[in-house]
Amino acid sequence: MKLKTFFRAPLPGQVIFGSGRVAELAEICEWFGRRALLVIGGGSLERSGGLARVEEALRSGGVEWDVLAGVPAEPPVECVDEGRQKLHALGAQMVIGVGGGSVLDVAKAIAALAHEEAPCVAFHRGEVKVTQRGLPCIALPTTAGTGSEATPNAVLTDRERRVKASLRGGDLMPAVALVDPQLTLSCPPAVTAHAGLDAISQALESWVSVGANPLSDMLALDALRWMAPALQRAVSEGSDLSAREAMALGSLFAGMALASARLGLVHGIAHPIGELYHLPHGLVCGLLMPSVMEFNMPVAGGKYAVAARALSLAEPGTDDQQAAEALIAWFRSLLCKLGVGRPLGEYGLSPADFDFIIEQGLPAGSTRHNPRQPTADDLRAFLQKLIEAY
Ligand SMILES: [Fe+2]
């Protein structure tokens, strides 16, 4: 077996995983100080009782905090600047993000840019670079999806330019990923399905990425082993803690895998499609995944076959081609079982937007890590097909 001789794997300073572990938040905060900016999304965290558990932990540890609430999906760069103002007003020594991927991304960006002067948009457009070490971020995911608790990037939107892209860099990696699957118990079925499709797509993309390496392979394959049998159950039986735990662990592993291996074509074009039609990121990823796997078959079929066998999807004695096809068929049937299996044309995808999607998607870092490099014509044909198929 040929060993890949070079790889790098950015990882959170510490990973703490387990149901009920949110109670450890007070002790973790003590490592960094006594004042924190708490970043959260809409009201669902409050309604679920999750916010009360977080605040109880902070109170018991004597932590003083202010809150940046209402972080939206597809968060704009301005949201980060609002958080930086609150952070400075409080003199906070850390940022705590409790929410889905958007919330965690904003929390990470606030922490990373804490000591910078320029507005967030200047970093997002690449006009300036981070020069000073930021503040620690503690990331508590409430969805099992993006794996943002374990990645050194924050996806933000520049609404003026209609560009959704990542801020990327070591300072964006959370100091602590505190993954308590109980925080995901109240995640609604549709969000659970979309987030889970994102996580499974991320595992599959890192598995075949040109940056795949021994560590990311181990994480990506194990991520699939945990999530593939659990997603449907987490959606239909939201209170099933074992399904939630499997999804939380799998999405964490997928995040760690992608931080090292990067992603692929699905994520390269999911951002412009999501931005154009305001579709949930995970839904777009899921709808793109089977067709991208078909496109990648000539170069990645062998690895898809390994994944299919690991998930017991291939009949004994089948060859790699048949095993890989079984993986693709399984993914399509998963989309149907989750009730989202419809062509992207029905979600709004239109040829009028192909130029924009290609212009944004082709040079994306994720696309460059896809195992098979598409041309603009490949992408156009691919998008045309997606109008009527998934
Ligand atoms: Fe994703």
Image (cartoon, grey):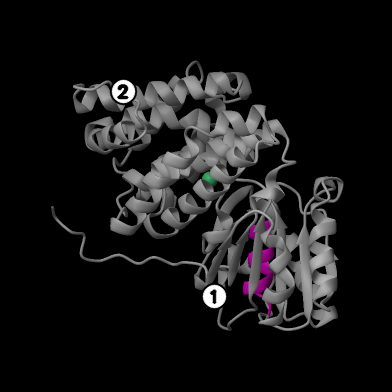
Of the image marks 2 and 1, the number of the one nearer the N terminus: 1
Q: Is residue 390 visible?
A: no
Instruction: Indicate the quadrant where residue 96 lies.
Output: bottom right
The amino acid pointed to by label 2 is Glu
Q: What distance separates the C-alpha of mark 2 from that of mark 1?
A: 44 Å
* Rendered position, 277 above or below 156: above
Q: Which numbered disc covers residue 361?
A: none
In the rendering, at what x and y percent does residue 220 appear?
A: 39, 48
The residue that mark 2 highlights is 325
Residue 379 counted in the magenta span: no
The residue that mark 1 highlights is 129
The amino acid pointed to by label 1 is Lys
Q: Nearer the viewer, mark 2 or mark 1?
A: 2
Left or right of residue 340: residue 2 = left
Q: Helix or strand or loop: what does disc 2 sit on?
A: helix
Tell me the residue at 42%/23% (across/down): 330
Label 1, ligand 1: CB separation under 8 Å: no
Tell me the residue at 83%/50% (across/down): 49
Residues in magenta, as a range: 104-114
- Mark 2 Cα-neighbour bin, 10 Å: few <14, some 14–19, many ≥20: many
User: Most prominent secondary structure in the magenta stretch?
Assistant: helix
